[in-house]
């Protein structure tokens, strides 16, 4: 599965473009997850950088935090032949609505 299609790249706004918004109000454009562990990445912004695609968003892993991650980083994750996947059914929305829909909070 291609994690980041050309169409999705165009839809994701550049890094720092939503800084004026509170975190809860930022638009989430994509969701990636790792099926072998409880890791999820919600992408709010991203752009090309040095042959990679750098992204900013909310990460649920060992802790829950906002931060930066890259496409190369996500594509490099593999455990027992399982890799990071994109949620094909994810519907973009503002962060607080995504969290309510995904986790009931």
Image (spheres, helix red, strand yellow):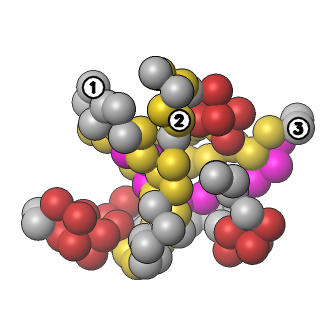
Mark found first going from the N terminus, 1 or 3: 3
**Stretch of the chain drawn in magenta:** 40-49
Instruction: Tell me what residue is drawn at x 47 percent, y 21 percent.
Output: 79
Q: Name the spot of residue 22 as percent of width and height, x first.
A: 37, 64
Q: Please, which residue is most extreme toward the front here?
A: 81
Instruction: Tell me what residue is drawn at x 52 percent, y 27 percent.
Output: 81
List the residue tagged with mark 2.
83
Q: Name the spot of residue 62 as percent of width and height, x first.
A: 27, 25
Under tag 3, what secondary structure? loop
Residue 71 vs 73, above or below: the answer is below
List the residue tagged with mark 3.
51
Measure the C-alpha gap from mark 1 to mark 2.
18 Å
Callout 2: 10 Å neighbours few (<14), some, many (20+)? some
List the residue tagged with mark 1.
62
- Report whether 85 appears left or right of 63: right
Q: Please, which residue is most extreme toward the left here?
A: 104
């Amino acid at each position: 599965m291609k994690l980041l299609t050309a169409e999705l790249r165009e839809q994701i706004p550049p890094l720092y473009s939503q800084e004026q918004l509170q975190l809860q109000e930022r638009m989430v454009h994509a969701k990636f997850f790792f099926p072998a562990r409880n890791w999820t990445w919600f992408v709010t912004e991203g752009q090309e950088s040095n042959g990679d695609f750098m992204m900013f968003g909310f990460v649920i892993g060992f802790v829950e935090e906002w931060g930066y991650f890259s496409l190369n980083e996500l594509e490099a994750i593999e455990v027992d032949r399982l890799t990071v996947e994109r949620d094909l059914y994810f519907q973009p929305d503002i962060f607080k609505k995504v969290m309510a829909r995904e986790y009931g909070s």
